[in-house]
Amino acid sequence: GDLFQGDAKEMNVQESVNFVFAVDDEKSTCKLPVEMDDVNTTTCNICRMQFDSNEYLRAHLRTPALPDVSYKSCREGNPTTEDRNEKCSSLPTSAPSVSAKPTIVPTTESIAINNATILVEATVEKKYDSKRLKNICRQADFPLSEYIKSKSQCETAIKNGRVFVNRLVAFDTGRVLRENDIVTLVKEGQIQAAGGSSEQVANASVIKFVQEIASTQTPGLSVVIANKPVGVRCVGSFASSTLEMKTQKHYECSRGVEKLFCRPLTKLDTGCAGLCALAISPEPLEQQPDLESLNICYNFTVLVHGQVPETWKDGIYAKVPTKGVRQWKRQKTEDSGADDHDSSITLSTTAIDLDNAIFINSLDVLSISGAEQQDEQCISTLTVSSCHDEGRMANVIPYILRKLGYPVVCDRFAKREYSRLPRKMKNVLKQKICIGLYSLDIEFERVKQTVATEVHKRTQCEFWRHSLEQVEQSKSSLQV
């Protein structure tokens, strides 16, 4: 290929090994010995490696031109002669058969098909070899296409644990299938019959039930705290993939009852991950007066652009837009000048009722400087608390912070600020908005408690500080 003419900094790739080749005018060519048996040497004439015997040297020359050092050895230092000899002695004497099929070893967390009701089963043909699961299931001539008509239906079936590959449940939509693999579609809700426990069913749906708070006054009534991922809708009985229906199904199985009533208490946005509160009861929840005493304060963690003022470390209050959570969207009004009625957000250090306000607190600030940035950039980690429960708070908070001049990282209305971030950050972020609901302060039947889960690393300045320091260290080592 062509000789690389760029800067060495452009060659830095995280978690990889870089090999730099240069042309030596005096020794641009290397010649192999004609007869290895007649040459009393243990030095490779190509890479100049030293070996203990001619046998190891001949094994080295027979191998393909691949790196002889592993990533670990590159980090710790140059490989020793013993490492090279061990590598050569472990080489196979003959090449493996290309048609050989790898053995599938089920893990301890795998769920077998067992007694689940099978709707259709098919074998992967040669023309679909090395194709992905989500694409094969929708092919017109593949038997599963009789039940799976669209991409969304395919992804839903796989996430719900209805698709099995070689008699083991498959949750990865991008799994690569090989010829003669067996793909099975089972009836909806049959993962429990397939031998999966309640905990496995929850993990299969990527929904984790963190805590259950039982009522001391009403038998059977409980407040459940669930940790939902991005892409799961909280409210709705129209599909089995919503958080409401998954929670209802989970506790019907765990309690061994035929019917439970479930009502989401937290209306968290579909595009935001975090903790959600739901009420479950054997009786209709509209007739439960104990839920009237329930009070929840939502504590969001946010990563924003810019360095927030020092006064924010003690906390600052801001009112939620008066016309509701859709205030920032253009609405039709009789007065044409009323669109920007609440375009400016007023801050206050005086305590305000959090039912219609948010409390912002600064936790950490990171200054980013380097060759990729034209000027110094800053990011800040904030916590935003509110008792406002009309829904869409993951949209309200970015709107308020954007009006204050500190947009959330990866907000679609802050693409200019996002473009100034280092390449390392953008490679990790991948356009995922940095906001999540990781803590709830719950007061139920006059008992207060805090339920929290692990905060995602991309919202923490400390994580980015450590990552960017590693990048700078690798750059300096390449320059040396």
Image: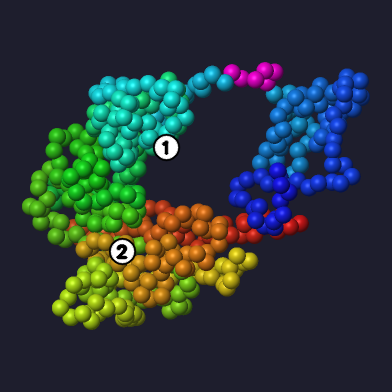
Task: Name, please, the residue furthest toward the left.
Answer: 287
Instruction: Give the amino acid at mark 1.
Output: Gly
N-terminal of the pair, mark 1 or mark 2, is 1
Instruction: Give the amino acid at mark 2.
Output: Asn
Work out whether residue 182 can be spotted.
yes
**Helix, strand or loop at mark 1:** loop
Q: Of residues 285 and 193, which is closer to you in this image?
A: 193
Callouts 1 and 2 close, C-beta under 8 Å: no
Magenta region, residue range: 92-97
**Helix, strand or loop at mark 2:** helix
Image coordinates of residue 111 in percent, x first then y, are: 36, 28
Image coordinates of residue 12 in percent, x first then y, are: 64, 53
Q: Quadrant of the N terminus?
A: top right
Q: Which residue is mark 1?
A: 174
Q: Residue at x 70, y 24 (%)?
A: 91
Left or right position of 283 against 138: left
Q: Is residue 479 magenta?
A: no
Q: Residue at x 32, y 40 (%)?
A: 151
Left or right position of 379 against 437: right
Q: Residue at x 29, y 63 (%)?
A: 393
Query: Which corner quadrant of the image does residue 74 belong to?
Result: top right
What's the CA distance linking mark 1 and mark 2?
A: 30 Å
Q: Residue at x 21, y 63 (%)?
A: 390
Q: Foreground mark, 1 or 2?
A: 1
Q: Compared with residue 130, is residue 333 higher up or lower down, i.e. above or below?
A: below
Image coordinates of residue 44 in percent, x first then y, are: 83, 32
User: Dot 1: within a 10 Å radius of its alpha carbon, few (fewer than 14), some, or many (20 or more) residues?
Assistant: few
Q: Which residue is mark 2?
A: 395
